[in-house]
Amino acid sequence: MKTIQFREALREAMTEEMRRDERVFLMGEEVAEYNGAYKVSQGMLAEFGAKRVIDTPIAELGFTGIGVGAAMNGLRPIIEFMTFNFSLVAIDQIINSASKMLNMSGGQFPVPIVFRGATGSAGQLGAQHSNSFDSWYANCPGLKVVVPSNPADAKGLLKSAIRDNDPVIFMESEQMYGDKGEVPEGEYLIPIGVADIKRVGSDVTIVSFGKIIKEVYKAADELAKENISAEVIDLRSIRPIDYATVIESVKKTNRLVVVEEAWPLAAISSEIAYYVQKNAFDYLDAPIRRVNSEDVPLSYASTLVEPALPNAGKVIRAVKDVLYLS
């Protein structure tokens, strides 16, 4: 094992896949000459040249459309959005072209493309740069949606995403690029659609994904001090969702809390709560609790950012609610 940053794990995944397959290329704003807005693509221009690491104008709709067309013609593009907030400019190409093309063409045109970049809040960036669009994209058939929470998962999942023949939305976090973690040496892939039990527990199941799971870990540590054993599941992929792992955990713990950064209406937590109550109702000893961002645009003021987002305190309160300790 080696310890590297989240951004380095992403870079390794892209670099290894570009060395392995000459059809893979990276395109987006500042990915080449500037080495990436968050330095994810540092050094890649020098190795692969300007035909495979391509700087674009500030024109998400345009370069996303080019990427979709390239994928339909046999290439395997990686399209970087500086933030998924900017992907809304290109959402017509993502939804109406990339996700639907295989179906509309009767299987003649797969679209093997990865759309990756930062999502969610990153501090005082204001309402227009702080949205979590995970559940938006997960709502769309034809897409796969991956939200890793650590460097090892980021590398293994991104390599799988690049090799996948379907379009993949790969969501990162600006606040995680500097996070360090152990990453296996050599070639390895993590299959899309397989959750990971990060901590084994017996009293309550907590399901989460992406950067917000770090708040779950803090909560689990505090709960352990009170002899409350939390099983923590990292979904890693939210389309497809590994329902089976969640169900098996709930059968053991009989209680469920779902934590995500998105707004509460029509969220991934809503889907999981529905699925569990439908398929494991008899195992539940308490109503399922969800912890989401508050149902408001995120403010710029620092005093209003933290109260609006999920945090360890909110997770602890939710856990104690399902344990009838509050």
Image: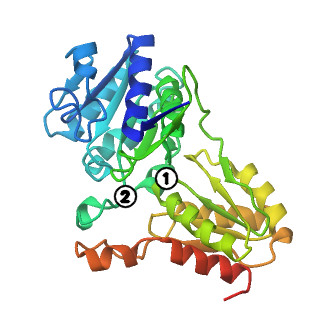
Q: Position of residue 27 (x, y in %)?
A: 26, 28
Contact between marks 1 and 2 (CB within 8 A): the answer is yes
Is 36 placed above or below 263 here? above
Q: Residue at x 62, y 33 (%)?
A: 191
Q: Disc 1 marks which amino acid?
A: Gly
Q: Disc 2 marks which amino acid?
A: Gly
Q: Position of residue 214 (x, y in %)?
A: 51, 59
Q: Residue at x 37, y 58 (%)?
A: 120
The answer to whether residue 264 is seen in the rendering is no
Q: Residue at x 18, y 34 (%)?
A: 30
Most extreme residue toward the bottom is 326
Q: Position of residue 182 (x, y in %)?
A: 53, 37
Foreground residue among 150 and 71? 150
Q: Residue at x 21, y 31 (%)?
A: 35
Q: Secondary structure at mark 1?
A: helix
Bin the neighbour count of mark 1 within 10 Å (Cα to Cα): few under 14, some 14-19, many 20 and up. many
Is 45 placed above or below 64 here? above
Circle on res. 210 = 1
Q: Position of residue 73 (x, y in %)?
A: 37, 16
Circle on res. 120 = 2
Q: In screen coordinates, is 96 left or right of 83?
A: right
Circle on res. 139 = none
